Image (tube, rainbow, N blue to C red):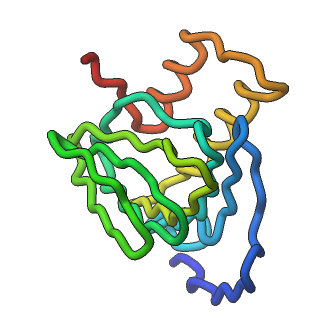
Amino acid sequence: MSLPIQEIVLAPGEGSHLTIGNSEVIFKAVGADTHGHVGLFENTIQPGGTAPILHIHRQMEEMFYVLEGEVEIQVGNQTVQGQPGAFILVPRGTPHTFANRASKAAKLLIMFCPAGDREKYFEGLAKLLQEGQTPDREALLELMRQFDQEPVET
């Protein structure tokens, strides 16, 4: 029998912080908090900030909710200029990516369902991008494969 899920109450800016390139992720809830059901991360992306290559997830849905600024989100055959309040659901198997092409920082919530240990992908990515280095392509692809993220060739 698994332990009950515990309450999490976080004030603005609280949570475990992680720097990925010139972007920041704050983990609000991770898979370990929800028995793997859902993960919720806040992502602040600087203009021209770190953006994933076009990819799919085979085992999870991903959701985006724009809080501040403008985030360009490509999902399937659509490209959306996400303003505050915009919501995008990305079904598993759907190619997607996102970027901040505006002149000011943007902030969005990213939710994964099921979450598994998705935060470990972001932790690995932060290590690959530390000190501004360009990650080794094979190391990046291996990290992606390990956490249900598969690049889409265009």
**Looking at the image, residue 88 lies above or below residue 55:** below
Q: Viewed as shown, does residue 42 lie left or right of 150?
A: right
Q: Residue at x 29, y 62 (%)?
A: 88
Residue 116 at x, y percent in the picture:
48, 55
Q: How many labels does the image show?
A: 0
**Looking at the image, residue 24 lies above or below residue 151:** below
Q: Residue at x 27, y 54 (%)?
A: 90
Q: Which residue is drawn at 51% across and 69% down?
A: 35
Residue extending furthest toward the right: 131
Residue 101 at x, y percent in the picture:
49, 42
Q: Viewed as shown, does residue 120 lie left or right of 17?
A: left
Q: Residue at x 36, y 28 (%)?
A: 150
* Location of residue 64 by image quarter: bottom left
* Location of residue 62 by image quarter: bottom left
Q: Viewed as shown, does residue 112 lie left or right of 22?
A: left
Quarter in which the C terminus is drawn: top left
**Looking at the image, residue 140 lies above or below residue 1:** above
Q: Viewed as shown, does residue 46 lie left or right of 76?
A: right
Residue 149 at x, y percent in the picture:
40, 34
**Looking at the image, residue 59 lies above or below residue 137:** below
Residue 47 at x, y percent in the picture:
61, 44
Residue extending furthest toward the front: 103
The front one of 93 and 86 is 86
